[in-house]
Amino acid sequence: MRVRLKDLARRRDRQTLLVAVVVVVQAVAAVFFVADALGDIAADGISLHIVIEGLIAFALLAGVFLGAWHMRMLLAEARRREQALAVARGALAEHVAARFRDWGLTAAESDVALFALKGCDAAEIATLRGAAQGTVRAQLSQVYAKAGVSSQAGLVSLFFEDLLG
């Protein structure tokens, strides 16, 4: 999940950079057309050519302002979503910790239960914790008994029910 979130953040950053580059190019083009139109007015007076350049400069300026405004809105929305995700992550972590406390899990059982919630099997948990598989299986049995379930799927199901309920 963390890798996916990092990939999404990188993609969002690339999109933001692309929009910023487009806005800068538009701004440079608008400045060029405005300067050219002013130079033409000073040299030749107002003509159809200068009016068209003025309209193009206006369109580019409008694009610059709209692009900058849109980028600002996108960045604000991304920040709101990241904050909401952080709150949800924190709330889930608090919920898991509260359930573990309610069940009276030891620190070791809590670690094992958390790995089980993440989808690890007994062998993986044993490797991650540097413990024997038999010890992990015994701890998982204690976790399941304290939680009132009989399997890893049942343990995960408890948390999904809480989230969906």
Image (cartoon, rainbow, N blue to C red):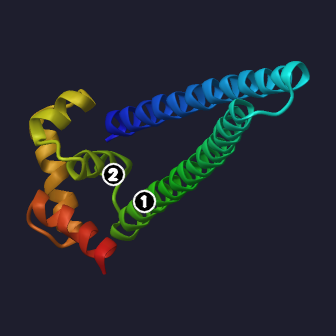
Report which quarter residue 162 is drawn in: bottom left
Q: Residue 150 in the image: state x and y as whole percent.
A: 8, 66
- Name the residue located 74 percent from the left edge and 31 percent from the top edge: 50
Report the Cα–Cα distance between label 1 and label 2. 8 Å
Nearer to us in this view, 123 or 42? 42
**Residue at (65, 41) in percent of width and height:** 68
Q: Residue 99, image x and y in percent?
A: 37, 67
Image side of residue 10 versus residue 41, left or right:
left
Farthest-out residue, right: 42
In the picture, the quarter occupied by the N terminus is: top left
Label whose residue precedes the other's in the sequence (1 or 2)? 1
Residue 110 is tagged as 2
Q: Residue at x 54, y 28 (%)?
A: 17
Query: Is 146 left, or right, of 153 in this rendering?
Result: right
**Can you identify the residue that label 1 sits on?**
97
Q: Residues within 10 Å of mark 2 (few under 14, many from 20)?
A: many
In depth, the one of 103 and 52 nearer the eye is 52
Which of 145 and 149 lies nearest the eye of the viewer? 149
What's the residue type where badge 2 is placed?
A: Ser
Residue 57, given in percent of the width and then of the height, sits at 70, 35
